[in-house]
Image (cartoon, rainbow, N blue to C red):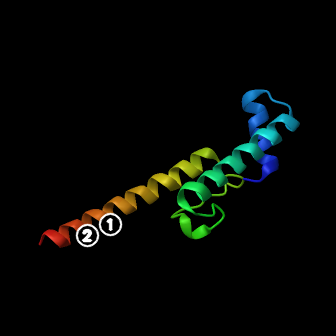
Amino acid sequence: ASLAERVTRECAASGLTPAVAVAQLQRADHERSAYLRRYHKADCRDPLLYDLQLNTGRLSVEEAAELVVRAVERRRASFRRTGDRERS
């Protein structure tokens, strides 16, 4: 989701002012990015790091959750088929 949408959600959930919410979100984003760089030598903006990316600015939480569940179920079924072939 865009920063503006994330700020709106954060304000609604926590009662923070928009200015404080922006600061907290930007700090959290920076810390997350720094952690990945430091410990994994990875850039969190690299789309190849992710199997699935969802724009929660365009999807509801329920829609996003449903897509994640479907992806996990398909991945699990794929692993089972691969495992069955390897045992034969």
Amino acid found under the numbered disc labelled 1: Ser
Q: Position of residue 56 (x, y in %)?
A: 67, 52
Q: Position of residue 2 (x, y in %)?
A: 77, 53
Q: Nearer the viewer, residue 76 or 34?
A: 34
Distance from Cα at disc 2 to Cα at disc 1: 6 Å
Secondary structure under tag 2 reads helix
How many other residues sit within 10 Å of disc 1, few (<14), some (14-19) or many (≥20)?
few
Secondary structure under tag 1 reads helix
70 on left or right of 39: left
45 on left or right of 71: right
Find the residue positioned furthest to the left.
Answer: 88
Amino acid found under the numbered disc labelled 2: Thr
Report the quarter where the C terminus lies. Answer: bottom left
Q: Are marks 2 and 1 in contact (CB under 8 Å)?
A: yes
At a point 66% along the width and 53% down the height, the residue shown is: 34
Q: Position of residue 48 (x, y in %)?
A: 56, 70
Find the residue positioned furthest to the top.
Answer: 15
**Quadrant of the rendered structure where residue 70 is?**
bottom left
Q: Nearer the viewer, residue 60 or 78?
A: 78
For residue 71, above or below residue 87: above
58 on left or right of 52: right
* Residue holding disc 1: 78
How many other residues sit within 10 Å of disc 2, few (<14), some (14-19) or many (≥20)?
few
**Quadrant of the rendered structure where residue 7 is?**
top right
At a point 72% along the width and 50% down the height, the residue shown is: 30
Disc assigned to residue 32: none
Disc assigned to residue 82: 2
At a point 63% along the width and 64% down the height, the residue shown is: 43
Q: How many marks?
A: 2
Q: Position of residue 58 (x, y in %)?
A: 70, 55
